[in-house]
Image: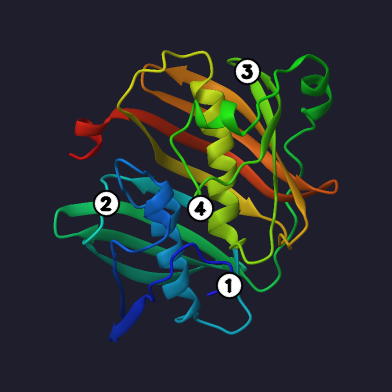
């Protein structure tokens, strides 16, 4: 299970060309301790992870690796005790293969996901170096400052420090990968999204009872693995802020090499009652 956020196995069945993945969402999953302590909800990236785990067991040809989360739209919450089911289909797309999935629970559709796989994963072009300017004029936040803004707690808190933040504009943050922690594609994307959440919420009204949710991912391109001891630097730019939501873009870098390029992510802030609907 190295590199995965979820402990419970994903069951994969085939019926002709149809592949179905099923996950029993146990209340004892470690992610619920920190996502969130008073409002347990399965992280959106865990839904993506479940689809990826099912996809790796049904690859249309050997040697394929996950190249990108092309799209992921999150339509409803997954709570402890739910059974998550996803129907997968594969299609060729040039030199890549796309896996499409529709995921739901007994309560209805919760997500649509499209993942792209390649035999040889090219490194994406850098999104741009914003770290130098932020280091000069940005705000720094320690863990207390981070947890005052976002509701994530261990073991799902995947940030160490905000090294520079310009409110309403951009941010850099770091996380050192520790041996024994999962650092596959889903945790890397989750860590970047937490940094995006800090930027989206900094300077806003810290109203009690709000929940930070991942709304959508468009074009999260993977360019390399993260190993224990690596210091991941997340770079985030705020593209648009609306009441209750924000659109962000950026990248994650290890020792000057891009390991994740994020074209567009939408995060949303909801009251607990609305989020549970």
Q: For the residue labelled by badge 3, is the local secondary structure a helix, a strand or a loop? A: loop
Front of the two marks 4 and 3: 4
Residue hosting label 3: 169
| 26 sits to left or right of 262 | left
Which image quadrant is residue 223 in? bottom right
SS for callout 4: loop
247 lies above or below 158: above
**Label 2 – label 4 distance at C-alpha:** 24 Å
Mark 1 in CB contact with mark 2 (< 8 angstroms): no
> To which residue does mark 4 refer?
155
| Front residue (pair 51, 99) | 51
Q: Point out the tag, 4 or 1, that comes first from the N-terminus.
A: 1
- Check if mark 4's residue and mark 3's residue have beta carbons within 8 Å: no
Front-lying residue, 134 or 21: 134
Q: Earlier in the sequence, mark 3 or mark 2?
A: 2
For image coordinates 42% across by 41% down, the residue present is 216
**Alpha-carbon distance for marks 1 and 2?**
26 Å
């Amino acid at each position: 299970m190295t590199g995965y956020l979820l402990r419970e196995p994903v069951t994969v069945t085939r019926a002709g060309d149809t592949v179905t993945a099923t996950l029993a969402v146990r209340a004892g999953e470690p992610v619920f301790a920190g996502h969130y302590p008073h409002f347990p909800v399965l992280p959106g990236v865990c839904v993506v992870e479940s689809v990826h785990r099912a996809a790796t067991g049904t690859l249309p040809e050997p040697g394929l690796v996950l190249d990108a989360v092309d799209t992921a739209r999150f339509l409803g919450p997954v709570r402890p005790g739910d059974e998550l089911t996803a129907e997968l289909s594969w299609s060729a797309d040039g030199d890549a293969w796309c896996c499409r999935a529709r995921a739901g629970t007994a309560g209805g559709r919760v997500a649509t996901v499209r993942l792209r796989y390649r035999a040889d994963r090219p490194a994406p072009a850098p999104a741009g170096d914003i770290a130098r300017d932020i280091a000069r004029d940005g705000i720094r936040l320690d863990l207390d400052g981070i947890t005052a803004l976002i509701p994530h707690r261990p073991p799902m808190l995947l940030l160490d420090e905000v090294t520079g933040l310009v409110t309403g504009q951009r941010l850099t943050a770091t996380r050192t990968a520790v041996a024994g922690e999962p650092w596959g594609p889903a945790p890397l994307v989750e860590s970047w999204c937490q940094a995006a959440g800090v930027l989206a919420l900094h300077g806003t009204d810290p109203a009690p009872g709000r929940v930070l949710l991942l709304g959508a991912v468009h074009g999260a391109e993977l360019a390399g693995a993260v190993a224990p001891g690596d210091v991941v630097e997340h770079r985030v730019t705020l593209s648009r802020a609306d009441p209750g939501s924000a659109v962000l873009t950026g990248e994650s870098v290890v020792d000057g090499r891009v390991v994740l390029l994020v074209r567009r992510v939408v995060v949303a802030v909801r009251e607990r009652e609305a989020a549970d609907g």
